[in-house]
Image (cartoon, grey):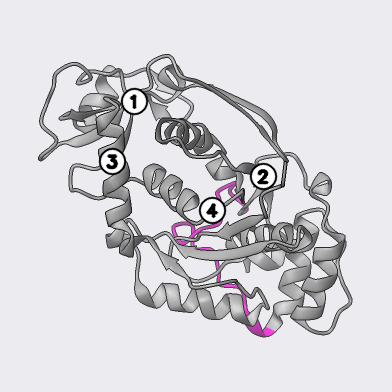
Amino acid sequence: MKQTPYVGRFAPSPTGPLHFGSLVAALASYLDARNAGGIWRVRMEDVDGPRCRPEHARALLQSLTAFGLAWDGEVATQSGRTALYGCALDALRARGCLYGCACSRREVSDSALDGIEGPVYPGTCRDRRLPWEGNAVRVATRGAMIEFQDRCQGVQRQALERDIGDFVVRRRDGLFSYQLAVVVDDADQGVTDVVRGADLLDSSQRQIHLQQLLGYQTPRYLHVPVATNAAGQKLSKQTLAPEVNPREAIRWLNLALAFLGQPVSSASTPQALLAAAAQAWNPARIPAVRALPAPLPALA
């Protein structure tokens, strides 16, 4: 059987500038793709319109270019792909997988047990046949057991109904959920390998559940440790992570390589460094943990 060509992607949310944590994710996905001789795409996950800004997207692309992380093809944006998400929602509805939910967050919290990401929705509205208009739309997880082998973190298992519960695929305000959008985007773009931060590791089973319901192929997954600050919080805009300086691209790229357990480089340009790093890339060297402290320069 002919092997499917490698297609990877970096899919940031344009909510702020490139910081060390997002550089690590971008670098890992880039090197994995280039080591395999594959395609590396960039996609802006701006489905959550209120938090995402075009100026942040432009700044992120400028930073990637400055760091030598050259992508293939056009940059996709989720905000321009809502018709695809609507078609996927129709396909799920035709399978009888969806239902309207009128429960507020407080009602869910009051009646739910805690799961791996907080309150587990107990299926209150599953059989109420509520209209979709003005309500959230959830996908049923009846008895779904999802298991996959992560290339860094090992075997992952979830009993979705017990650990997560029926989850939202379209919000009450009409916005499509991240879980649905990312599944549709990866399938539409032919993504074979998802390399991203381990903060999204527990989302994978929900995405695989949707892939199975929609008849999509499941990509290979590799979740790298997320970088944390001195308080143990993931580096992000919310935790005031500082921007990486493109004028010090070599320094920052070597810090990210060391964070990923890869050999650092004495190259004098980002392009030469990335070429050598892609050739030497070895996922087995990545620490098999969900989080690691960022190096001190990344916190300054």
Which of disc 4 and disc 1 is earlier in sequence?
Answer: 1
Q: Residues within 10 Å of mark 3 (few under 14, many from 20)?
A: many
State if disc 2 and disc 3 touch (CB < 8 Å). Answer: no
User: What secondary structure is the stretch in magenta mostly built from?
Assistant: loop
**Kind of residue at badge 3:** Leu
Q: CA distance from mark 2 to mark 1?
A: 25 Å
Q: CA distance from mark 1 to mark 4?
A: 27 Å
Q: Residues within 10 Å of mark 1 (few under 14, many from 20)?
A: many
**Kind of residue at badge 4:** Gly
Q: In this picture, which residue range is highlighted in magenta?
A: 230-247
Task: Report the residue marked by disc 4.
Answer: 190
> In which quadrant is the N terminus drawn?
top right
**Kind of residue at badge 2:** Leu
Tell us which disc is closer to us: 3 or 4: 4
Q: Quadrant of residue 112?
A: top left
> In which quadrant is the C terminus drawn?
bottom right
Task: Report the residue marked by disc 3.
Answer: 89
The image shows residue 90 at horizontal and vertical percentages of 25, 39
Q: Which label was assigned to residue 222?
A: 2
* Badge 3 element: helix
* Badge 2 element: strand
Q: CA distance from mark 4 to mark 2?
A: 17 Å
Q: Taking 244 as reference, is 292 above or below it?
A: above
Task: Report the residue marked by disc 1.
Answer: 166
Q: CA distance from mark 3 to mark 2?
A: 27 Å
Q: CA distance from mark 3 to mark 4?
A: 19 Å
Query: Residue at 82% of width from left, 44% of height from top?
Result: 284
